[in-house]
Amino acid sequence: MSSMKETIKQVAIDLFFQKGYFATSISEIARGCDIRKASIYYHYSGKEVLLLDIMQTTMQDLLSNLQAGLAQAGSVEASMRAAVRTHVVFHLRRQKETFIASSELRGLSPENFKLIVTQRDDYERIFQSLIGQGIDGGIFAGGDIKILSYAILTLCTAGASWFRPEGRFSVEQIAEIYENFVINGLKAAQWSCVGSAARASY
Amino acid sequence: MSSMKETIKQVAIDLFFQKGYFATSISEIARGCDIRKASIYYHYSGKEVLLLDIMQTTMQDLLSNLQAGLAQAGSVEASMRAAVRTHVVFHLRRQKETFIASSELRGLSPENFKLIVTQRDDYERIFQSLIGQGIDGGIFAGGDIKILSYAILTLCTAGASWFRPEGRFSVEQIAEIYENFVINGLKAAQWSCVGSAARASY
DNA sequence: CTGGATCTACCGACCGGACGGTAGGTTGCG
DNA sequence: CGCAACCTACCGTCCGGTCGGTAGATCCAG
């Protein structure tokens, strides 16, 4: 890939993160690259293709990052810990891209939307499988696997929405906090919600 | 408030939630209300004012909802449980508005942005105070109060991003799941991250 | 080693259309 | 009548995208 194409991508990431996809114009991106608007179209055939490129790279890297993190883990608990840790670290280290990938899906056409969502679903399924294994093995308390996976993933993903690299805590420290939080949540006993909600008086 | 003004607001909520603030045009909102575009400006002086109105109502209701929920609670733990429960229930019941309020802040001018963020900060401070009381009283394990509050609030807020009213679980059931998850997380012992992260080998 | 052909990376000028917003007229109800 | 609530018609601006063109590097046949 030419260096200008990468520059465009990086500038777009910065601007999409800062102002949002729809609020960012091609002219602005071009200005950030010190070229004219028309030249963008030499490298990218349109605005949405640029967004798609950012998202696809992010999702691919996210998945291979998780696979690499899981490769070394032995037990189910270790796998779950590794999964949460790599997820959080990736989301904080590549904060802008992951934020875009999770908040600008509406900028995609139905076909491209499906492309990204499919990758996201594959990723989620790995977590769901781990949760299921943990419950079956008696390591984790029971509960609805999908609800659990949504809670865990949105919790960790949302870290990228408030994290400031110059803040008091390092990426690794936050990852450790989240790792313990999730594991404790999974191990706790009160996860079953069958019947109890019906008894409660809201 | 005239009924048409409320109609406009409701249609705007639906569209902002569905397509996003910048991707929604005034004409579309007007079409949804069966009036012409110019008539919108009789009720709202501009697009941003409409967004601001939605956000302010949401934030005010969110706060009074929390205060009402806390009024009956006795102990710190009961307060924390009530806070999480009311927060989740509000976010699921008024999913569209809370989603807008937390994802479209970039659509506001600096002054209006500050207005909403101030209300959000006040709200967060209630949670931080409860966490602090719990830690001081030995009910919760230690940890950084702000990080904890961010984690808890983003976790519960994100529920509104995947919740489907027609899904398998009711609002109350999900609220109960989240309530227990948060309390268990706060009570668990491994929250301190001083030193341990430095020892870990990531 | 030279000179035409081709390719890369960019440019200025332009287009149709949609946007937020405005001016001023009309309607109909109390 | 008077005013609230709505309308039609229009404005300037900016958007994503296209077009024809070009400087300069590269290539390759004679």
Image (cartoon, coloured by chain):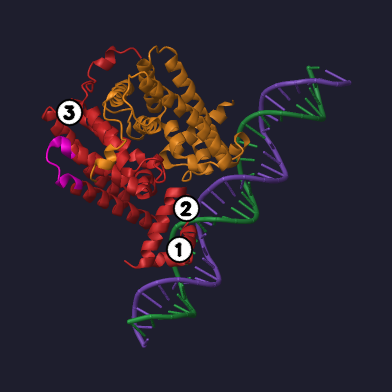
Chain colours: A orange, B red, C green, D purple
Residue situated in front as seen by the camera: A27 or B75: B75
Residue depicted at 25% across the width and 33% down the height = B180
Dots 1 and 2 on the same chain: yes
Is residue A14 visible to us here?
Answer: no
Q: Secondary structure at mark 3?
A: loop
Q: Amino acid at mark 3?
A: Phe
Query: Disc 1 vs disc 3: which is toward the camera?
Result: 3
Q: Secondary structure at mark 1?
A: helix
Can you say whether B66 is above or below A151 in the image?
below
Chain letter behind tag 3: B
Split into 4 quadrants, where in the image is the N terminus of chain A? top right
Residue span colored magenta:
B69-79
Query: Disc 2 vs disc 3: which is toward the camera?
Result: 3
Q: Is residue B27 magenta?
A: no
Residue situated in front as seen by the camera: B100 or A18: B100
Q: Amino acid at mark 1?
A: Cys
| Residue at the disc numbered 2 | B24
Residue situated in front as seen by the camera: B93 or B115: B93
Residue depicted at 55% across the width and 34% down the height = A115
Q: Position of residue A184 (x, y in %)?
A: 28, 24
Give the CA distance from mark 2 to mark 3: 45 Å
| Residue at the disc numbered 3 | B140
Q: Secondary structure at mark 2?
A: loop
| Residue at the disc numbered 1 | B33
Dots 2 and 3 on the same chain: yes
Q: Position of residue B132 (x, y in %)?
A: 16, 33
